[in-house]
Amino acid sequence: MNQDFIQALRDLEREKGIKTEILLEVIKGALESAYRKNFGTVQNAEVDIDPETGKVRVLAKKTVVEEVTDPRTEISLGEAQKINPSSQPEDVMEMEITPKDFGRIAAQTAKQVVVQRLREAERGLIFEEFSDRAGDIVTGVAQRQEQRNIFIDLGKTEAILGLSEQIPGEIYLQGERIKVYIVEVKKTTKGPQILVSRTHPGLLKRLFELEVPEIYEGIVEIKSVAREAGARSKIAVHSRDENVDPVGACVGPRGMRVQAIVNELRGEKIDIIKWNPDPARFVANALSPAKVLAVEIFENDKMARVVVPDYQLSLAIGKEGQNARLAAKLTGWKIDIKNETQAGYFTDEDDLEE
């Protein structure tokens, strides 16, 4: 190795972010192994690399003794004093024992180590970058399909969109740009494995954070999300500023903000619900678009009994129970819905929505 090699390592540090000192330490360790493999197993042999010139030396630590029994680890007092007149028995001296053709071995070993280390470092950097982004969304390009899994190109690496994380009925064309939610980043022997989703409720939450400045700034808070991907979702929002309407902020001017999210999710219906600290009002709001006449809360059972107008019962329950199911997920309450005839309830239809 020489000064050009050291300069190449410094260039790599700038380009790849791998410190030259770390590379030199790894190369040093590999050279020590190569020395022991090719020139014997002297346990106290060490490799020294000059960080400025790249010169490689093999050094052995030898103990000064009156009588040498093992020349690999010992040096006589007389020989030691020729090198350093102040040497005394039991002193440890460092001596160069670099073999003549060790430079060739050093160059080959260094190249192998650097290539391997670069690969490991790049994988490590990718893992660190994306492990910090778990729970975030990224935009990638659909590349290929293998065993019904879609591989998404994220630039530096690929992500896997598993079958269970794909929106039912969605087709991903090669070269198409799509937004995905990072569910998990795993370390594997082949590098980081990034698992992403299009069905996770977190995707909807992050999309609203991107589209609605009031959410990003913390003025409007997303309290909960309930989602049946590809069909319908409900999102409960609350404003920390009484002058800001949380539902209106999420809908946006002429519905542009929510429409952008609907388009990204390819037509998924989204109900934006105003959160309320009163469980009865929150449950009533969550059953939107149905009107609610009365809500009875059973704290111990975490259940809400809801009364709706006769003609609103099917709307409150929804197709195949979807509206009631999403409302229950959104609020965290079991919801029992009855019409006013079943409940024996009569009213002027003053509903509880707020």
Image (cartoon, rainbow, N blue to C red):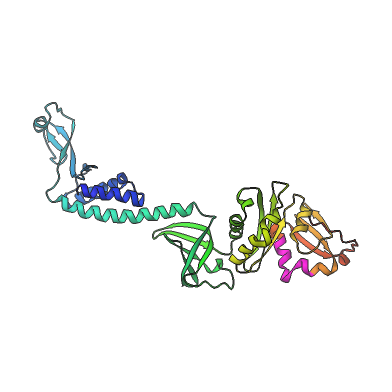
Which residue is at the front of the view, 109 or 62?
109
Which residue is at the front of the view, 119 or 52?
52
Q: Is residue 265 left or right of residue 66?
A: right
Residue 21 among magenta residues:
no
Which residue is at the front of the view, 205 or 85?
205
Which range is magenta? 314-327
Q: Quadrant of the C terminus?
A: bottom right
Q: Residue 217: horizontal and vertical position, in percent? A: 61, 48
- Quadrant of the rendered structure where residue 259 is? bottom right
Identify the residue shown where x is 52% and y is 62%.
Answer: 196
Residue 315 among magenta residues:
yes
Q: Residue 293: horizontal and vertical position, in percent? A: 84, 60
Work out whether residue 331 can be spotted: no
Prevalent SS, magenta region: helix
Q: Residue 146: horizontal and vertical position, in percent? A: 46, 72
Identify the residue shown where x is 15% and y is 45%.
Answer: 98
Q: Residue 91: horizontal and vertical position, in percent? A: 18, 30
Q: Is residue 325 shown above or below 109?
A: below
Identify the residue shown where x is 13% and y is 47%.
Answer: 99
